[in-house]
Amino acid sequence: MKILVCPLNWGLGHATRCVPIIRGLMAEGHELILVADGFPLQFLKQEFPSLRFISLPSYSIRYSKSNSQVAAMIRSFPFLVGGIIREHRWLKKLLKTEHFDRVISDNRFGMWNKNTHSIYITHQLMVKMPDKLKCLESLVHLIHKGFINRYNECWIPDREENDGLSGDLAHKYKLPLNSKFIGAISRFQTLKDIVPDTSFELVAVISGIEPQRSLFEKELIEKFRNVRQHTLIVSGQPMEKKKEIHIGNVTLVSHLSSVELGSVFLGAKHIISRSGYSTIMDLDVLNCLHKAEFIPTPGQTEQEYLKLFHS
C-alpha cells in the first residue's frame, strides 16, 4: 500500500512515537510518505533518510510565559481552526493528483478524507481542562469525539488494562466505536542491545512549544551548571549538524539519535523531563520510569495530570 503519515508538530513527541509504526510498515513493504514541519520534520529525515517528505505547517500555537495557558489557547483558537481547515483542504487537493491507500494522522484533526481509509492516533481522547473551565470538559470531549468519528479508525497508543500509562485520558469515558488500543509505542522498542552510557549522572530532555521550551532549558542550565555531577541537557532541536556546548558541568546538545538517547537514559542515575506522554512511553519501554522526575509545562493540564498519575 501507499501510505501517508502525518504527525502533529507540538513538540517532538507525536513524531517520535510514529517511528515504530513507520518502521513496521516499511518492513511489510509498504510505500511511506511523511508529512511534517519544523523540528519533527528534521527528526524524521534523520531517522528515515530514504523516504519521501512533504513539508506542511501544523497549527500556529504559542504558549504563554505564565503558569496559565488559558489566555494563550483562547488567542490561538482561530489559528487552530484555520489550520485544521487548511490541512483538510490540502489533503483533498493532494488526493486528486496522487493516490494513497491509507492516511495516518497523529493528532492532526483535519487529515481525513471520506474517499481514503483514514487513521487517527491519540492517547488523549478526553481533554483535561483547567480548574476554572472544568464545566466544559464533557463538551470538549464530545467535540474531540466528533473529529475522531470522521476517521475510519482511531489507534490509542496505550495498554487497555489497569488504566494503562494514560489514565483518564484514554480510560475515563466510553470510547468511540472506531477506537482500539494498540499498546504503548516507542522509538526504542525495536532497538536491540542498547549499551548504557554512564558518562552523565543526570540527563534532562527539553521539549514542547515556545517560549516554555526555552524557559525550561535556561532554568535547568542555571540550576545545574555549578553542580558537581555531570549533567547532559538534550535541547530537542534536531538539525542537520548536531551542536554541543559546555556550560560549567552542563553539556548542552541540540539533539541525539535514538540509540544515543536510549544509551544515556539507561546509564543515567536521574532523568528530568516534561511529563509528555511520548516521553513516558519511551521511559516505560526502557524500564527507566523509576528514574524520572517530571516537570510539567506550566498550565498544560495534560502534563500536570500525567505527572500526578505517575507520581
Image: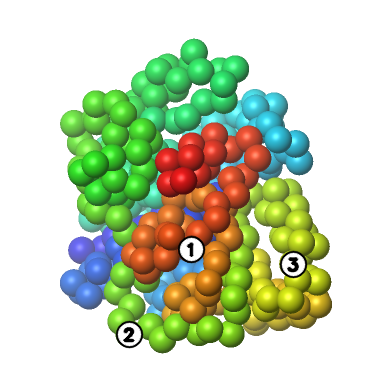
Q: Is residue 60 left or right of residue 48?
A: right
Residue 249 image position (x, y, % from top left): 75, 78
- Does dot 3 land on a helix, a strand or a loop? helix
Q: Is residue 36 left or right of residue 111?
A: right
Residue 84 image position (x, y, % from top left): 49, 37
Q: Can you identify the residue that label 1 sits on?
A: 291
Three-letter residue code for mark 1: Lys
Residue 68 image position (x, y, % from top left): 68, 31
Q: Residue shown at 20%/44% (left/top)?
A: 161
Residue 79's image quarter? Answer: top right
* Disc ID at residue 111: none
Alpha carbon distance from label 3 to label 1 = 17 Å
Q: Earlier in the sequence, mark 3 or mark 1?
A: 3
Q: Is residue 97 left or right of residue 242?
A: left
Alpha carbon distance from label 3 to label 2 = 31 Å
Quadrant of the image for the N terminus? Answer: bottom left
* Disc ID at residue 224: 3
Q: Residue shown at 74%/67% (left/top)?
A: 224
